[in-house]
Image: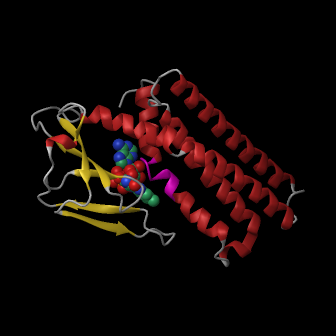
Amino acid sequence: MTGQKVWTSYAALSDWGILLARTDPTAPKHRGISYFLLDMRASGITVRPLRQATGSTEFSEVFLDRVRVEPEQLVGAVNQGWDIAMTTLAHERGTGFAFKEQVLQRIALEDAIALARTRRRAADPVVRQEIARRWIDVEIMRLFNWRTLTRLERGEEPGPESSLVKLFWAELTQRLHELALALEGPHAQLAEGRWQQAWLWSRVASIAGGTSEVQANIIAQRLLGLPR
Ligand SMILES: Cc1cc2nc3c(=O)[nH]c(=O)nc-3n(C[C@H](O)[C@H](O)[C@H](O)COP(=O)(O)OP(=O)(O)OC[C@H]3O[C@@H](n4cnc5c(N)ncnc54)[C@H](O)[C@@H]3O)c2cc1C
């Protein structure tokens, strides 16, 4: 295989990646694709980590040059890869990160409230309104997660509804970290502390796991039935 689309797991140097390869060049765009597990230690694979604004390297460019893939590495049936990829992505967006993020965003909100108190901003009615809105956001995230758990309990897939969770979380975390920097005031521009780093990382939320524009397209087309 050369020059195919590869997904790796969130560790850049993970041992296994997902390879989507076109196995029927004559089939329409989303058909004729097969899903393989790719041994990232195989010869011909070059992983080049990409450095982010936070300084860390959570994802990479992956280059394939005459990589050999065995039939045992195929997942599901030949040419059914797109459907399997959609299920994988729905889990990434709906179950892979969302429960952890519910807890992390709740902790960030509590820390932001503590920050408002130490900066003597907690009595400011505008600040209080913003905190209340962020609190409502975190509650909505919790209810989204409950809905996902209910679907899983019924034996249903997370489905395109997972794009609602992903899109909502991306906006939630960005709004919450904007609030924290606003509470730090002008000092936020000088410091290189916890909130600055977390604000930078919150920018990832609308890109990784599929951008917010792509989630909006999925919601429009697959949930609302709107035209492309
Ligand atoms: C921190 C981080 C970690 C990541 N981790 C991983 C990982 O572990 N594994 C992995 O495989 N990938 C990972 N990624 C890659 C991530 O999934 C992609 O960056 C993301 O899906 C966007 O794809 P792209 O970069 O090719 O941008 P493009 O698809 O080129 O998009 C560029 C711009 O065009 C817009 N756009 C594209 N298509 C459409 C459309 N149809 N309609 C409207 N707008 C559109 C996008 O919204 C975006 O603004 C990570 C990215 C980041 C930032």
Residue 209 included in the magenta stretch of the image: yes
Q: Is residue 29 left or right of residue 55?
A: left
> In the image shown, does 129 or 22 lie closer to the viewer?
22
Q: Quadrant of residue 121?
A: bottom right
Q: Position of residue 8 (x, y in %)?
A: 34, 53
Q: Is residue 97 left or right of residue 12?
A: right
Most extreme residue toward the right is 123
In this figure, which colouring scheme has been used for the structure? secondary structure
Q: Position of residue 188 (x, y in %)?
A: 69, 72
Magenta segment boundaries in residue numbering: 204-211
Q: Quadrant of the C terminus?
A: top left
Q: Position of residue 47 (x, y in %)?
A: 28, 65
The residue shown at (61%, 52%) is 173
Most extreme residue toward the top is 154
The residue shown at (52%, 36%) is 164
Q: How many marks?
A: 0
Q: Quadrant of residue 227?
A: top left
Most extreme residue toward the bottom is 190
The residue shown at (76%, 64%) is 183
Relative to 145, residue 173 above or below? below
Residue 133 included in the magenta stretch of the image: no
The residue shown at (48%, 72%) is 55
Q: Please, what is the dominant secondary structure of the magenta stretch?
A: loop
> In the image shown, does 22 or 119 lie closer to the viewer?
22
Relative to 198, residue 224 above or below? above
Q: Is residue 168 left or right of residue 12?
A: right
> In the image shown, does 197 or 69 lie closer to the viewer?
69
Q: Position of residue 90 (x, y in %)?
A: 43, 36
Relative to 204, residue 216 above or below? above
Q: Quadrant of residue 112?
A: bottom right
